[in-house]
Amino acid sequence: MSDTDLDIIHAVDYEMLKAVTEIFDKHNLEYFLLAGTLLGAVRHGGFIPWDDDADIGIPRKSYDVFLEKYTKELPDRYKVQHFKTDSSAKYYVTRILDTNVEVREVRDDAEDTAKTYASIDLFPIDGTPNNKLVRKVFIWRIMFLRMLASISQSNNIDMLRKRNPIEKIMVKIAKTIPFDKLLNRNKIFMRIDKLLKRNPVRGSKYVGALMGAYREKELFPGECINGLKKVRFEDTFFSAPDNTDLYLKWLYGDYMKIPNQSEIKRKKHFEIIKKNKTEI
């Protein structure tokens, strides 16, 4: 991706962040910058220079209220992609797309590289069982259903992602058997949705977005978000976990350390195909 393309994606994502969070602030809904977006705010004062996406974490109650009541308040150019309202949605999480900027999603050597649009991701934040054994069983159930959802759309599987031996075997099987004709992705997402909603955020020792890219690693101590605060991201202040340091250490360890070139290269998610410059 050229620096010009990256600058454009940053600008487009930034406008989407502001548009979405203004609605959340207007209706007193909770949200916070998540993962690399929060890391960018703390370490770089905005976007991580080589990263080309933006993520928001939303406690489940606020997430559902936003989807049910307030998405119509977004500018007309934005499209909400959610599996309950869009059968073409590939992911469980919600995406807000800017339909003025066409991009190709880079999935390493995945076969499905059809066009989409510049987007930001909205992740529902859910609780998990406090009992350690029960939590492990709960996570296993989610991961099993997630695997079924993945093999139901085998052309979209990222073949270069690090996986354990069992996952590698399942991926190979998925590539040879037409599971997309045997499994209904949306029905699987509905089962996952029902399971995730069982455990409230408040009172859970560990919370997070199990349907995020890093699965169980997306969980973090619930005490990180007992409260929220404002952090500067580019030229705007957004909500962030009150215990930002604990959150970032939990996810990244020494989060102020700059990654190596190999890790930086893996952060490429999109390539711009077409943009309407007059609308950006």
Image: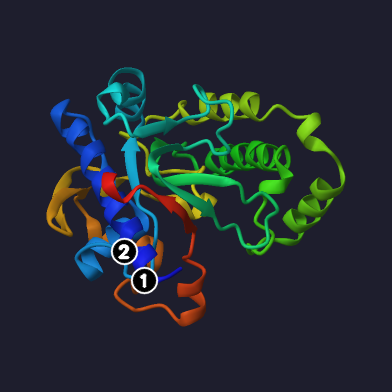
Residue plotted at (40% across, 31% down)? 80
Q: How is the image coloured?
A: rainbow
- Dot 2 corresponds to which residue? 7
The image shows residue 151, relative to residue 75, as above or below, that is below
Helix, strand or loop for disc 1: helix
Q: Quadrant of residue 199?
A: top left
Q: Quadrant of residue 2?
A: bottom left
The image shows residue 78, relative to residue 274, as above or below, that is above
The image shows residue 135, relative to residue 246, as above or below, that is above
Q: Position of residue 173 (x, y in %)?
A: 84, 49
From where the camera sits, is residue 244 visible? yes
Q: Amino acid at mark 1?
A: Asp
The image shows residue 34, relative to residue 161, as above or below, that is above
Q: How many marks?
A: 2
Q: From the viewer's side, name the closer residue of 140 and 131.
A: 140
Q: CA distance from mark 1 to mark 2?
A: 6 Å
**Residue reaching furthest to the right:** 176
Residue plotted at (76% across, 52% down)? 171
Q: From the viewer's side, name the closer residue of 9 and 109.
A: 9
Q: Residues within 10 Å of mark 2 (few under 14, many from 20)?
A: some
From where the camera sits, is residue 280 visible? no
Task: Give me the disc on residue 97.
Answer: none
CB atoms of marks 1 and 2 within 8 Å: yes
- Dot 1 corresponds to which residue? 3
- Side of 171 relative to 257 (left or right): right
Q: Position of residue 230 (x, y in %)?
A: 13, 50
Q: Quadrant of residue 186?
A: top right
Q: Position of residue 83 (x, y in %)?
A: 53, 28
Q: Amino acid at mark 2?
A: Asp
